[in-house]
Image (tube, rainbow, N blue to C red):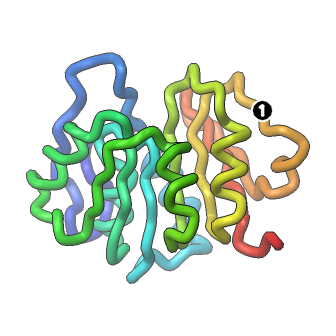
Amino acid sequence: MRIISGYLKSRILIAPDSESIRPTSDRAKETLFNILANTEDFEGILCMDLFCGSGSLGFEFISRGASKCIFVDKDISLTDRNMHKLGISDKCEVYKSDVIDFLRKNPDLKSEIITADPPYSYNEYENLLECISGMKVLFILEHSENYTSGIKFEKYIILKKKVGTVNFSIFDFKNTS
């Protein structure tokens, strides 16, 4: 597991030693960021990495110019270790919390891009999308092939991409009312 591009390029991240954390593969991460780089400017943005695990996606945004990333997960130990290893704690806010609870308690948080990589067995996708849809953001959801969005949110999907066993759905909630 490494940083793909930017000023932290090639830095190695501490990998999880348990199967409860499933980090996004380097190949999937590289594909995702190649897609995003065609339409998004990461310089100076605020982003969130939900279900952050190792923090890999958020650190990639920081490496590519994001000014700050908010990391949220029930277990933040690996994100915390990687943040200190990279020496970027000044660009990170790390919260140990259930993601839905965090979003409901902090509805006014500002962010341009949010990523979420919940466990593949996650069953609260609709609640997650409900919380995020009002935030006026680009939302990247990593999920298993078994996930299907409900009718309410299907119209916001601008891209679906499969990379190996990883599936991304990108939602554009920027112009919702």
Q: Residue at x 71, y 59 (%)?
A: 133
The residue pinned by badge 1 equals: 148
Where is residue 136, by image quadrant? bottom right
Name the residue at the right extreme.
151
| Residue in front for this viewpoint, 25 or 20 | 20
Q: Residue at x 46, y 48 (%)?
A: 50
- Report whether residue 26 is seen: no
Where is residue 13, by image quadrant? top left
| Residue in front for this viewpoint, 102 or 82 | 102
Up-down relation of residue 174 to residue 105 (above or below): below
Percent across and percent down for residue 78 are 21, 38
Q: Amino acid at mark 1?
A: Thr
| Residue in front for this viewpoint, 39 or 77 | 77
Percent across and percent down for residue 95 are 32, 51
Neighbourhood count class around disc 1 (C-alpha, 10 Å): few under 14, some 14–19, many 20 upward: few
Q: Quadrant of the N terminus?
A: top left
Percent across and percent down for residue 147 are 71, 29
Q: How many marks?
A: 1
Q: Residue at x 36, y 53 (%)?
A: 71
Q: Residue at x 55, y 70 (%)?
A: 108
Up-down relation of residue 36 to residue 110 (above or below): above
Q: Quadrant of the C terminus?
A: bottom right
- Report whether residue 92 is seen: yes
Percent across and percent down for residue 63 are 29, 66
Side (left or right) of 165 relative to 95? right
